[in-house]
Image: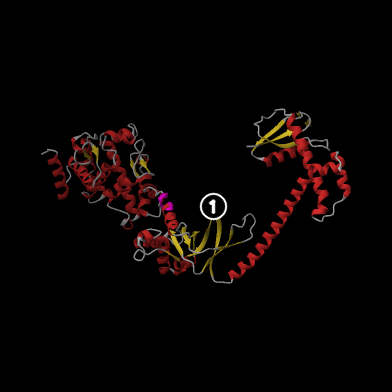
């Protein structure tokens, strides 16, 4: 591949300190020829002596270094420059004959004198090339005129076509995989009426372009929009149009004909490839609140090239979509009052908060975190009895009271549960905790939540909670190998998180504290003890 350089054509002095020898490589631009020409022009402007060029942009297959001296490249440039000037002079001689242009003969004479060549010599060496060059220029002019005429004719046809009925949307034009596509702004009212999806009872799965519509999911989206009318977000849909579309650019500086109006034939089918639940949810929302029909959603539109392509589009979009973890959803969804309360609790429990993984459904093997936000949410539910469904019944005073109680609860855990303080303070690595102990696992945290709820339920008021009961948690053996947890949260030497595992582990904690239990917990605990051979 040719590379581009700037070379000194003769000795040159720029300012008082910088000088270049004839043939010296001044700068290197490799694949950027335009940068080389600009650099040469800038250097020539700095030379105080006028009348001749001192620097030029050259092209060379060799890999040169800055400072190299190449007189042969100067000679080659001078030869090429002579040929260019001679060819241009010959074109001037031929233009009156080939194009009918009037050329000043004195100009041609001056150029011949400068080239030190006669007209006969000029014709012999350059006439054939000059004729070809002029012919190519005329061809380009003709083709440009023809293209302009075609554009004018197309504009007339387009204007006529506009007079026919079409769906028209403001849109931006783009290119993907060498094919044109559009991103249109579609009003909700139009979206619900025009864009369709395959019905399950009409079209079998193998002949559909997307999955079956879930009415429940669509209703959830509708409820979300209606419940957050001034603060909701719906991402773009993807659709295919069965007929050729027309795009009418709007003249905007810098838009390069990419912004305009998209015209879709009235008899075209507009099929949803991705976003059918959003489309149905919007339809349901409009039925409840007609004012929404004037709002818009972005729709990415492709020309429909058949069922197979539509099915592939659906697969490509969904196979590469990555669903965020339930933990990161809980962290970001501040519209959910239960999530907000849990995060408020953690703000008041900085030691616990430092050990919570806010991004993953469960901490990784090498993570320094102990529990995920999802596990802590489950702990809060078991401890308080409140969930996302009934949190609205808990007033702010009660929420603050629960936070105060939970703060005391974890303080008691740190004081009495063996190795809890070392685990929470990070003196024992989380990886080692997961490997050897039960107390750092989600199943044990949930069991602790059940234990805490039982402790609170024994008290008629917060002031009467029997915190001294927690002192007996000093009997806890945190090791996985302990018989205390066999068949409960540890099965065959491995942690096991099941409903019975949580309940039976909670029952064990209640036994330590001499707390009464429900018949179900007593029965479950007795069954596990019998299986383990404990009377």
Q: Quadrant of residue 368?
A: top left
Residue 252 in the image: above or below residue 368: below
Report the front residue among 86 and 256.
86
Would you say the magenta stretch is mainly helix, strand or loop? helix
Residue at point 39%, 47% (across, down): 328
- Identify residue for label 1: 178
Task: Answer with left or right where residue 286 lies relative to residue 439.
Answer: right
Report the front residue among 28 and 43.
28
Q: Quadrant of residue 231?
A: bottom left
Residue bounds of the magenta highlight: 316-321
Task: Answer with left or right where residue 1 lies relative to residue 354.
Answer: right
Residue 338 in the image: above or below residue 490: below
SS of the residue under disc 1:
loop
Q: Residues within 10 Å of mark 1 (few under 14, many from 20)?
A: few
Res 444 seen here: yes
Name of the residue lying farthest toward the left = 535
Name of the residue lying farthest toward the right = 106
Quadrant of the image containing the N terminus: top right
Residue 121 in the image: above or below residue 400: above
């Amino acid at each position: 591949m040719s590379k581009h350089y700037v070379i000194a054509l003769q000795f040159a002095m720029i300012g008082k300190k910088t000088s270049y020898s004839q043939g010296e490589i001044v700068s290197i631009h490799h694949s950027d020829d335009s940068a080389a020409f600009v650099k040469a022009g800038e250097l020539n402007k700095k030379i105080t002596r006028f009348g001749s060029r001192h620097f030029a942009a050259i092209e060379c297959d060799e890999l040169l270094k800055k400072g190299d001296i190449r007189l042969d490249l100067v000679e080659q440039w001078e030869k090429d420059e002579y040929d260019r000037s001679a060819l241009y002079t010959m074109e001037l001689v031929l233009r009156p004959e080939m194009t009918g242009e009037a050329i000043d003969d004195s100009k041609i004479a001056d150029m011949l004198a400068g080239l030190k060549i006669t007209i006969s010599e000029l014709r012999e060496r350059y006439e054939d090339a000059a004729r070809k060059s002029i012919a190519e220029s005329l061809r380009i002019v003709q083709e440009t005129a023809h293209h302009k005429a075609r554009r004018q004719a197309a504009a007339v046809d387009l204007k006529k076509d506009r007079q026919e009925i079409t769906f028209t949307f403001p849109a931006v034009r783009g290119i993907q995989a060498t094919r044109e596509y559009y991103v249109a702004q579609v009003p909700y009212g139009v979206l619900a009426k025009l864009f369709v999806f395959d019905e399950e009872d009409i079209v079998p799965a193998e002949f559909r372009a997307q999955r079956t519509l879930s009415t429940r999911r669509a209703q959830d989206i509708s409820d979300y929009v209606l419940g957050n009318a001034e603060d909701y977000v719906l991402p773009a849909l993807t659709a295919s149009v069965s007929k050729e579309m027309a795009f009418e650019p709007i003249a905007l500086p810098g838009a390069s004909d990419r912004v305009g109006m998209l015209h879709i034939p009235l008899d075209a089918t507009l099929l949803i490839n991705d976003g059918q639940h959003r489309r149905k949810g919007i339809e349901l929302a409009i039925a409840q609140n007609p004012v929404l029909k004037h709002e818009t959603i972005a729709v990415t539109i492709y020309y429909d090239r058949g069922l197979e392509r539509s099915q592939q589009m659906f697969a490509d979009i969904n196979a590469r979509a990555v669903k965020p973890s339930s933990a990161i959803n809980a962290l970001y969804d501040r519209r959910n009052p239960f999530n907000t309360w849990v995060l408020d609790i953690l703000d008041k429990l900085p030691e616990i908060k430092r050990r919570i993984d806010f991004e993953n459904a469960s901490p990784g093997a090498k993570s320094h975190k102990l529990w995920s936000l999802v596990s802590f949410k489950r702990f809060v539910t078991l401890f308080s009895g409140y969930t996302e469904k009934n949190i609205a019944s808990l007033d702010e005073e009660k929420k603050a009271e629960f936070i105060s109680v939970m703060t005391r609860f974890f303080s008691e855990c740190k004081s009495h549960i063996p190795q809890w303080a070392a685990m929470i303070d990070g003196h024992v690595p989380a990886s080692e905790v997961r490997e050897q102990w039960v107390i750092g696992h989600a199943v044990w945290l949930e069991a602790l939540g059940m234990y805490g709820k039982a402790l609170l339920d024994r008290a008629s008021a917060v002031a009467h909670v029997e915190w001294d009961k927690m002192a007996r948690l000093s009997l806890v053996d945190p090791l996985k190998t302990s018989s205390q947890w066999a068949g409960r949260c540890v099965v065959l030497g491995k942690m096991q998180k099941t409903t019975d595992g949580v309940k039976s582990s909670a029952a064990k904690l209640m036994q330590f504290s001499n707390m009464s239990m429900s018949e179900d917990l007593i029965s479950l605990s007795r069954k596990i003890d019998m299986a383990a051979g404990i009377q």
